[in-house]
Image: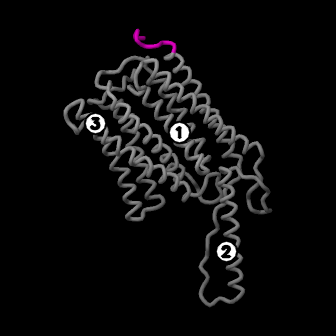
Amino acid sequence: MPTDVNSGLATLSDQLILATVLLYVLAMIGYALDLGFGRARAAAPARELVPAGVGVAGDAQTADAQTADAQTADAQTADARTGGAGTGSTGPGDGTRTPPAWAARAGTLAIALSCLGWATNLGAIITRGFAVGRWPWGNMYEFVVAICFAAVTAFLVMQARQPVRFLGAFVSVAAALGLGFAVRYLHVQAGPVVPALNSYWIAIHVTAAIFASGLFIVAGVSGILFLARKDGPSRLPGRDDLERVAHQAIVIAFPIWTFAVIAGALWADKAWGRYWGWDPKEVWAFITWIAYAAYLHARATAGWRGRAAVIVQLIAFGCLLFNLIGVNIFLSGLHSYAQVP
């Protein structure tokens, strides 16, 4: 380990990462118990068109059906407010059951574990930065650790604003796997970075890319769940809710990613004397931008909704993952700072 590195803080950072992996795994188990044993969400009944000229009895039946639809919608809204683990008895023959009380407690405990894991993840980033005296995302290991932190941050912020606890199990397992992969295959000893990265632009460009990527991961998880959800009662919310969550995350992430691309061009001009050089990292960052722009454009102008829009979003998510990981590992260029062991 280089002499200018605080070995004690570097070791503490590594230990905090291991603790974070454990906490995210425990949180994932709690979310899974809440999701698996909580109340199944009832599918909204199909509305039938009533032919013109029906009698009073037909009108009464229509009113009864609308009342039942409203009661179902109220029940789904109440269930959503509990994060998918509602309580209360159900009527006979409706195919649902009262969830055990411990299921809701498991979900609450999972959120607490996620917050604790978030804190240890942040602690690992901070101690790594102080150990080396620089911004702690100068190589692939540090970058993946920061992205996992950003994804959990995005989920916790969204959970504080709306009931998205159903995403917890999937975001937690993604973060745990990401950190585990980083520890097992990407870990490098704390040390200085190449001279090109000793710039204040790393705090601007890379930080923006990290937090945009965290939001894109949450959107990608929602899109995958959209495609995986079956019709009928489910532990997951409806497809409309899943698509809404994904769209909200992308609407916030896209301008941040746009800023990251622009900041990267400005940094390239300062470091290499040109804004654009067709480097693989630059190309795939731009491809990712185009893919997400296509999703937002199709949704806003052509009115794309449902499966078609989600597929475009997931194609963009695939471009993002290749840009973040594949380019650094498999392609060489001016951005080859991954330091993969």
Nearer to the camera, 213 or 170: 213
**Reading the chain from its start, which is encountered first: label 3 or label 1?**
1
- Which label lies toward us, 3 or 1? 1
The residue that label 2 is drawn on is 66
Residue drawn where x is 26% and y is 29% of the image: 334
Amino acid marked by disc 3: Pro
For label 1, the residue is: 153
Label 1, secondary structure: give it: helix
User: If you read the primary sequence from the N terminus, does the residue marked by circle 2 or circle 3 appear first?
Assistant: 2
Q: In the rendering, at what x and y percent does residue 86 appear?
A: 72, 52
Q: How is the image coloured?
A: one colour
What is the magenta range? 1-8
| Vertical side of 313 occupied by 53: above or below | below
Q: Which quadrant of the view contains residue 133?
A: top left
Reading the image, the residue beneath label 3 is: 280
Where in the figure is residue 175, as x and y percent of width and height?
53, 35
Quarter of the image for the N terminus: give it: top left
Q: Which amino acid type is marked by label 1?
A: Thr
Q: Which mark is residue 44?
A: none
40 left or right, relative to 298: right
Q: Residue at x 55, y 43 (%)?
A: 155
- Expressed as whole percent of the image width and height from the top left, the position of residue 80 reads 65, 54
Amino acid type, callout 2: Gln
Taking 82 as reference, is 205 above or below it? above
- Comparing labels 1 and 2, the label whose residue is closer to the camera: 1
